Image (cartoon, helix red, strand yellow):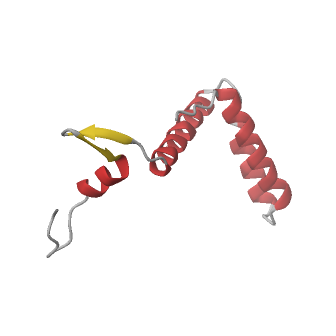
């Protein structure tokens, strides 16, 4: 599964999250001003917003990859990507590999 946010979608999501934080959390006025300033620096079409969109897509993709199980063919048999990740981890001392 592949999910990619467009810059305007990422901006809308960022706007909803930061607005909720500003309006519903018990943060100080200075913290609210800093969040608003941070949000204003990331207007649609800015380099900062494009970078935030890339970072959001990377984080979302990594999360989905961790939660999604796929099967791949390896040496004539099918294994899951989760099993492949477990095989790639270094074994503990004294543990016998299969």
User: Which residue occupies the extreme front position in the image?
Assistant: 77
Whole-percent x, y for residue 22 in the image: 80, 54
Lateral position of residue 14 relative to residue 66, left or right = right
Identify which residue is drawn at 74% across, 48% down.
17
Lateral position of residue 91 relative to residue 17, left or right = left
Identify which residue is drawn at 44% across, 47% down.
69
Whole-percent x, y for residue 26 in the image: 81, 66
Quadrant holding the C terminus: bottom left
Identify which residue is drawn at 57% across, 34% down.
3
User: Which residue occupies the extreme right position in the image?
Assistant: 23
Q: Quadrant of residue 87?
A: bottom left
Lateral position of residue 56 relative to residue 37, left or right = left
Lateral position of residue 23 relative to residue 1, left or right = right
Whole-percent x, y for residue 29 in the image: 82, 59
Of residue 14 and residue 85, the one placed in the foreground of this image is: 85
**Looking at the image, how many numbered discs can be counted on the residues?**
0
Identify which residue is drawn at 72% across, 40% down.
13
User: Which residue occupies the extreme top position in the image?
Assistant: 45
Q: Quadrant of residue 47?
A: top right
Up/down of 97 relative to 53, above or below: below
Whole-percent x, y for residue 36 in the image: 76, 46
Of residue 34 and residue 56, the one placed in the foreground of this image is: 56
Up/down of 63 relative to 53, above or below: below
Of residue 12 and residue 85, the one placed in the foreground of this image is: 85
């Amino acid at each position: 599964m592949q999910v990619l946010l467009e810059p305007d979608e990422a901006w809308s999501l960022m706007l909803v999250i930061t607005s909720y934080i500003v309006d519903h959390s018990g943060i100080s006025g200075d913290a609210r001003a800093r969040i608003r300033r941070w949000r204003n620096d990331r207007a649609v079409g800015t380099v900062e917003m494009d970078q935030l969109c890339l970072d959001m897509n990377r984080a979302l993709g990594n999360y989905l990859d961790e939660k999604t199980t796929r099967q791949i063919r390896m040496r004539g048999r099918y294994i899951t990507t989760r099993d492949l990740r477990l095989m790639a981890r270094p074994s503990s001392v004294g543990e016998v590999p299969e």
